[in-house]
Image (cartoon, rainbow, N blue to C red):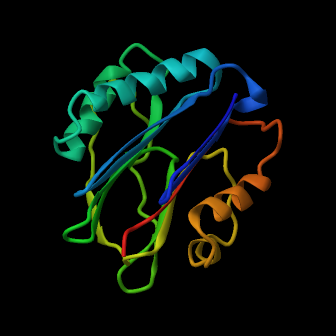
């Protein structure tokens, strides 16, 4: 399975492990004039069972996208009870205050350029969503207007992150450039969301 979505400020790419029918990574995007909410969930393993776990977390979050992010994470955690479990990251942007809110569990990576021109890469909680009681941490950062960011599953090995985010290329061209480094038949599910904050 291979999927690419392009818009003016978001490039989403996904390719499943060994081109299987079901990808274990599932993502959700919502944007309006006030900001955006992006979620990436990586079900443990690969194939249909990993997809089922990741999809359960996303479906739980989509029920109410306006609640606190840590409550979203708890709903997602409860949704995978009895399933394989999942790593997840949730980012929410507030355009008015130029703020990013981040929370997550497991090995999903998020990188952005902060308001002071520093590379920001918040760390998620260790472990994964499983239905068991978890502790969640909400992190808050100011973003640099007009800068790029990337959210990706562990299937993407990205070098020179800062150089990529500071590239003068538009999101679509840079997304295709990153895509070229991904194997045609990858050994893991690969998903990335490359975006750009408004000026």
Q: Residue at x 73, y 22 (%)?
A: 20
* Residue 35 placement: quadrant: bottom left
Query: From this viewpoint, which residue is outermost toward the top?
Result: 82
Q: Quadrant of the C terminus?
A: bottom left
Q: Residue furthest bottom?
A: 116
Percent coordinates x, y for residue 66 in the rendering: 18, 42
In the orientation shown, which residue stands out farthest toward the right? 184
Front-most of residues 130 and 150: 150
Horizontal and vertical percent position of residue 10? 50, 55
Task: Find the residue positioned furthest to the left.
Answer: 67
Answer with left or right where residue 92 lies relative to residue 169: left
Query: Residue at horizontal 25%, vertical 33%?
Result: 74
Image vertical order of residue 37 relative to residue 80, above or below: below
Query: Vertical placement of 76 versus 107: above or below?
Result: above
Q: Does residue 41 lie above or below 36 as drawn? A: above
Q: Is residue 157 above or below residue 42?
A: below
| Image quadrant where one finds the N terminus | top right
How many labels sit on residues? 0
Residue at screen point 24% across, 45% down? 69
Q: Residue at x 69, y 19 (%)?
A: 21
Picture coordinates of residue 76 (x, y %)? 32, 30
Q: Position of residue 175 (x, y in %)?
A: 64, 58
Q: Image check: 104 left or right of 65?
A: right
Q: Quadrant of residue 30?
A: top left
């Amino acid at each position: 399975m291979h999927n690419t979505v392009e818009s003016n400020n978001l490039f989403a790419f996904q390719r499943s492990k060994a081109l299987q029918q079901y990808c274990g990574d599932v993502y959700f995007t919502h944007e309006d004039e006030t900001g955006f909410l992006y979620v990436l969930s990586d079900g443990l393993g690969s194939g249909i069972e990993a997809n089922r776990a990741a999809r359960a977390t996303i479906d739980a979050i989509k029920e109410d996208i306006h609640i606190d992010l840590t409550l979203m994470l708890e709903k997602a955690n409860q949704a995978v009870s009895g399933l394989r479990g999942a790593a997840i990251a949730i980012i929410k942007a507030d355009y008015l205050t130029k703020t990013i809110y981040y929370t997550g569990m497991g090995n999903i990576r998020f990188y952005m350029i902060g308001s002071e021109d520093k590379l920001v890469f918040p760390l998620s909680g260790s472990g994964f969503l499983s239905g068991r009681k978890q502790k969640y941490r909400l992190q808050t950062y100011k973003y640099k207007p007009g800068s790029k960011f990337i959210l990706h599953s562990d299937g993407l090995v990205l070098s020179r992150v800062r150089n990529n985010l500071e590239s003068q290329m538009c999101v679509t061209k840079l997304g295709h450039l990153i895509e070229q480094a991904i194997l045609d038949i990858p050994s893991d599910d690969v998903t990335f969301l490359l975006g750009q904050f408004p000026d």
